[in-house]
């Protein structure tokens, strides 16, 4: 059962998401929060698998709430999906850097919402990879890229290759097909990369790959 916490300052929005998710046999809404502070408290109390986090809320915004959840070792298994009104939002890139696993536009279709929750819960892939790549490409170009950390030097040549494909939005199966590997081997490579770089999930690998200059917008078009 996938446990979800809904964080949004609009009661009707929370009610709508609850209605959609509650119809699924494998999803349970365990709590709601009207602001970021309540979202952090709720995450600590209920330990959900996924938090659907509005980015603009009173008391504490979704960006800072995401940062606090991602930075709490006790909440290591909690994944955050940012909810935004626009698909290109200045705050979203910051949220991904803060530890969010992806983002959704608020007017997304119910089927996409359900799919996103399931995908993020299992930590398997980014939400809407093509849109996420576009967003990261847009805002990565606006920030000063830090010098690549020594952790990147610990990656093997194959691991660097796998990381660039993760950053391009490919799933484990797609990476396996492109590199002529078994899906299990591709998954192992991704897991080792995340361990070496101390990142929470694939979304963090994407951000790191762009910031380190390992991949640039438009690098993979097919």
Image (tube, helix red, strand yellow):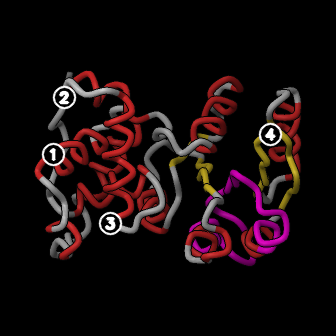
C-alpha separation, residue under disc 4 versus residue under disc 3:
29 Å
Q: Name the residue under label 3.
A: 197
> Residue 210, position in %: x, y?
23, 55
Secondary element under disc 1, as helix, strand or loop, is helix
Disc 3 element: helix
Q: In terms of secondary structure, where does tag 4 sit?
A: loop
| Residue holding disc 1 | 158
Residue shown at 65%/59% (left/top)? 78
Whether pointer 2 and pointer 1 mark residues with C-beta atoms closer than 8 Å, the reply is: yes
Q: Of the residues tagged 1 and 4, which is closer to the observer?
A: 1
Is 119 above or below relative to 210? above
Tell me which label, 4 or 3, sits earlier in the chain: 4
Image quadrant holding the C terminus, namely top left
Question: Which residue position holds label 4?
Answer: 1
Q: Position of residue 32 (x, y in %)?
A: 86, 57
- Residue 195 magenta-drawn? no
Q: Distance between the residues labelled 3 and 2?
A: 22 Å
- Left or right: residue 176 compared with residue 219: right
Numbered range of the magenta stretch: 41-65
Mark earlier in primary sequence (3, 1): 1
* Residue behind mark 2: 179
């Amino acid at each position: 059962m996938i446990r979800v916490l809904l964080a949004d300052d609009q009661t009707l929005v929370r009610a709508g998401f609850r209605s959609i998710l509650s119809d699924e046999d494998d999803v349970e809404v365990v709590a709601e929060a009207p602001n970021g502070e309540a979202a952090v408290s709720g995450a600590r109390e209920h330990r959900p698998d996924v938090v659907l986090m509005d980015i603009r809320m009173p008391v504490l915004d979704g960006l800072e709430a995401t940062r606090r959840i991602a930075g709490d070792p006790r909440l290591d298994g909690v994944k955050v999906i940012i909810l935004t009104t626009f698909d290109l939002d200045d705050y979203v890139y910051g949220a991904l850097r803060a530890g969010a696993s992806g983002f959704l536009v608020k007017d997304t279709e119910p089927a996409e919402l359900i799919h996103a929750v399931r995908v993020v819960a299992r930590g398997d892939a980014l939400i809407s990879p093509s849109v996420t790549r576009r967003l990261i490409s847009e805002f990565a170009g606006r920030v000063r890229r830090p010098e690549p950390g020594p952790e990147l030097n610990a990656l093997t040549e194959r691991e660097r290759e796998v990381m660039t494909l993760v950053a391009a939005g490919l799933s484990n199966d797609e990476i396996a097909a492109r590199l002529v590997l078994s899906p299990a081997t591709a998954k192992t490579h991704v897991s080792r990369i995340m361990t070496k770089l101390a990142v929470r999930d694939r979304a963090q690998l994407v951000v790191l790959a762009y910031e380190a200059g390992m991949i640039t917008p438009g690098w993979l078009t097919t």
